[in-house]
Image (tube, helix red, strand yellow):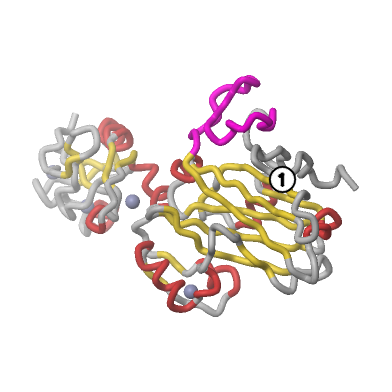
Amino acid sequence: MAKAKVGKKTTGIAMELPECPVCFETMSAPIFQCQSGHSLCNSCTSNLCPPICPICRQAMTQMRNLTLEDVIAKANVPCPNKSLGCVYTMLTQEVDDHLKECIFRVMTCPLGAVFGKCSWTGNLKEMMDHFKDRHPQHCNINMETGVELNNVSINEDERFLYLAQQGNLLFIVTMKIDTLQKVAYWVVQHIGSKKSAQQHIYEVHITSKQDPRRQVIFIDHCYNDILSADAVYRLGKCGILPLDMFSHFIHNKKCSFKFVIKKGTPKPKKFDKSNTSNENKQPNAPKHPKPKAGFTQRNKSPGPAKHHNVGSKK
Ligand SMILES: [Zn+2]
Ligand SMILES: [Zn+2]
Ligand SMILES: [Zn+2]
Ligand SMILES: [Zn+2]
């Protein structure tokens, strides 16, 4: 088979990835050969006029180098954003998917994406500064007191979006009132890879303004920001409250919620009831197999009363 003699890119599995001897780009299928066996990348082959091998001057053929294509398909390649700091390596066919979630990609403002009106682009490191500068009301979150929402009504569509920082990770917190679907929902998304998102669990605590004993808590794992918050809602994998229930949490058009984000088990291991992942260590932890869609009710251990459950009392 063709030896990767021209290659010099060191990959994750410490092999050299062949480059096209003409354009020096990493080759990808289809790879064509000349009559004496030189392999060129597809674009160089199709640009040859006349179709003569630039190395040996023999005619190019339609014969593909399937072995080399296979080697390349199985090789780990570095992220194209490596020079910006990404250390991720992956199979060549995974590059496109990774680039969508690579934290070193050029990003657009999450607020702009949802509401329009902001055309900021930049990298992840600059995003929080951009929010502090241009959207301070969307990132100043007091984790102690939570998020105060004003002018809330179950008869009006509304969407709230916040950028939250946890260590050096960023999360997008969305709360939406959807009068058409008759629900309010909460989604916490991690700006980063799917894997990293899966490793983060969030809790949203919504407490009634009038009666603090009335509380609902959602626990779920984060999705990343490739999906829109609406798409996560459509999956049903977020905190969802029917508007008639949500109405009990609004007082004088105000409501508030708190949230915490923590690193959790990547995947709840087993569906057995004794599963005690670290976010479920409370004595009355839900017996759900995993933190999942819909709302999870439970008693907070030091809570003021034993009935936070929504919709069941009163
Ligand atoms: Zn080439
Ligand atoms: Zn040749
Ligand atoms: Zn990357
Ligand atoms: Zn912006």
- Quadrant of the rendered structure where residue 218 is? top right
In this picture, is 184 found above or below 75? below
Is residue 38 shown in magenta?
no
93 relative position to 283: left or right: left
User: Where residue 25 sits: x, y (%)?
Assistant: 22, 52
Q: Residue at x 25, y 51 (%)?
A: 45
Q: Relative to 76, is 196 on the left or the right?
A: right
Crowding at mark 1 (Cα within 10 Å: few <14, some 14-19, many 20+): few
What residue appears at the point 61 percent right and 63 percent down from the top-left corner? Answer: 147
Instruction: Tell me which segment is drawn in magenta.
Output: 264-287
Closer to the camera in the image, 296 or 117: 296
Residue 242 at x, y percent in the picture: 81, 53
Image: 280 above or below 135? above
Q: Residue at x 46, y 55 (%)?
A: 191
Q: Which residue is mark 1?
A: 304
Q: Is residue 225 above or below residue 220?
A: below
Q: Residue at x 47, y 77 (%)?
A: 119
Question: In this view of the protein, can residue 229 be seen by the observer?
Answer: yes
- In the image, residue 267 lies in the stretch drawn in magenta: yes
Residue nearer the viewer, 63 or 10: 10
